[in-house]
Image: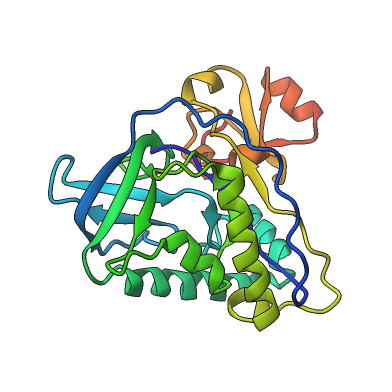
Amino acid sequence: MPELAPVEAEEQPAEAPQAAPPPKKAPAGKPWQRLDGCTWEADRWNDGDSFHILTGSEPPEIVARLYFVDTPEAETAYRDRIAEQAAYFGITKEQAVDIAHEAAAFTEKQLAAPFTVWTRWNSALGRSALGRVYCVILTKEGDDLAELLVANGLARIYGVKTVLYDGRDSQEYLAHLGKLETKAKAAKIGGWRFATATATPKPAQTVSTTPPAASLAGGCVASKNSAVFHKPECKSVPTIFPANLVKFGSREEATAAGKKPCAICKP
């Protein structure tokens, strides 16, 4: 599944949204494909922005990852991600985990009836044997799930970006999400209800795509927010956001940068 453009949260009432960086060209991908009549498939690892879907066609099941948005993580194993997400909203890590559970429940409720998936089949990596693909999800009522999450203060604007299935470019769409986020902040809903008046807002970030696995061959990799480095094939690597990924030419180079080896893959 392909990688998305980021969107995160934190903060203060009715502040003008931060300007998004100029859009880059969408990653090369297949033409948009529309899948109608899709249904939610319960799974232990479903969350607000990544979840199993039954398509009713081929392939019969996929793991969808939303473009443009990122909901907080509920799994404490993703400590660097949770810290990042909490900082975006200007809240505590514990509060971010609460929002993660709210976002997961919100998404499941929105997708209780058959819905539409638009995808270019770009890979978003992930631990599932099915892999993950970036998608735009429209509810039975025709509402964009990413927009609903931002409008309800349950997601940050963060992830892989792409030209939309209806021809809108990423800059136009990000500006729209920014307006929804500003309203959510002013209304103090979702994660914004915890934000303090003194929190320092962070600008929304976007990346064009995640580095393909082939580009990670050899050397070591790490998150810039983590003290640990890994082999490129380590199961922890797909959990690192593309914007935070750092590559080292050798184990010695990673150690010299102050990183320590992963206890799982033992680089």
Q: Return the x and y of residue 129 as percentages of the image width and height.
A: 29, 41
Between 258 and 145, which is closer to the camera in this rendering? 145
Viewer can see residue 197:
yes
Viewer can see residue 82:
no
Name the residue rendered at 33%, 37% in the picture: 32
Q: In the image as oriented, which residue stretches furthest toward the right?
A: 198
Name the residue rendered at 38%, 47% in the picture: 135
Colour scheme of this structure image? Answer: rainbow
Residue 116 in which image quadrant: bottom left
Q: Return the x and y of residue 76 as percentages of the image width and height.
A: 55, 62
The image shows residue 86, relative to residue 124, as above or below, that is: below
The image shows residue 215, relative to residue 257, as above or below, that is: above
Residue 126 in which image quadrant: top left
Name the residue rendered at 33%, 31% in the picture: 31
Which quadrant is the C terminus positioned in?
Answer: top right
Asked if residue 126 lies left or right of residue 12, the reply is left
Between 152 and 171, which is closer to the camera in this rendering? 171
Q: In the image as oriented, which residue stretches furthest toward the front?
A: 167
Which quadrant is the N terminus positioned in?
Answer: top left
Q: Return the x and y of residue 228 as percentages of the image width and height.
A: 67, 40
Q: Return the x and y of residue 260 as percentages of the image width and height.
A: 70, 37
